[in-house]
Amino acid sequence: MHTVRRYANRKFYHVQGHRYIGLEEIAALVRSGEPVCILDHPTGREITAEVLAQIVARGLATHESAVLDALASALRALIRLSRLPLEEGVRVAAAAAGLPTRADWERLEQRLCHLEAAVERLFDAQKRDVL
């Protein structure tokens, strides 16, 4: 886990690397799949989500409008989560992000079962013809 401290002067210090880093380097760590924890130095409060949101906001100008529209939908859904029951909130956020629903997965599982059965029947027919 990479630990980064944000100081009062808004500089970020990478604890393991013993050096100051910028938002671009934090973004690169996240893109590469590295776990990152960002702490506010004076208070010790974790501010990872705030800093990642700042990175996203700075990068928005370089993306196409379709990406921005999808992101805006997901953000609206996240804002609504605070007033919805947890299960409904997860469903709304997943739909806004374009993730498949439970029903989608069940339909896919049924199709896979039918496909497996059809392939099995073909193999059985081939075995009967060969013997």
Image (spheres, rainbow, N blue to C red):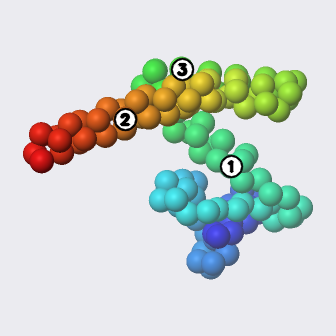
For discs 3 and 1, the disc positioned in front in the rendered view = 3
At horizontal 23% and vertical 42% (from top left) the residue drawn is 123
Front: mark 2 or 1 = 2
Q: Which percent across, then down, holds residue 21?
A: 58, 65
Q: Residue furthest left?
A: 130
How packed is label 3: few (under 14 Cα within 10 Å), some, or many (20 or more)? few
37 on left or right of 128: right
Say the numbered circle drawn on residue 117: 2
Name the front one of labels 3 and 2.
Answer: 2
Spot occupied by residue 5 in the image (x, y as percentages of width and height): 73, 66
Residue 82 as seen in the image, left or right of residue 7: right
Q: How far apart are the alpha carbons under marks 2 and 1?
A: 50 Å
Q: Amino acid at mark 1?
A: Val
Quadrant in the picture for residue 122: top left
Three-letter amino acid code at disc 3? Asp
The residue carrying mark 1 is 51
The reply, left or right, for residue 118 in relation to residue 70 is: left
Crowding at mark 1 (Cα within 10 Å: few <14, some 14-19, many 20+) = some
Residue 10 is tagged as: none
Q: Which residue is mark 3?
A: 69
**Percent x, y for residue 57?**
60, 36
Q: Amino acid at mark 2?
A: Ala
Q: Which of disc 1 and disc 2 is earlier in sequence?
A: 1
Q: Secondary structure at mark 3?
A: helix
* Residue 13 visible at all: no
Count all numbered tags in the image, as a single digit. Answer: 3
Residue at 47% of width from left, 59% of height from top?
32
Marks 3 and 1, the one that precedes in the sequence: 1
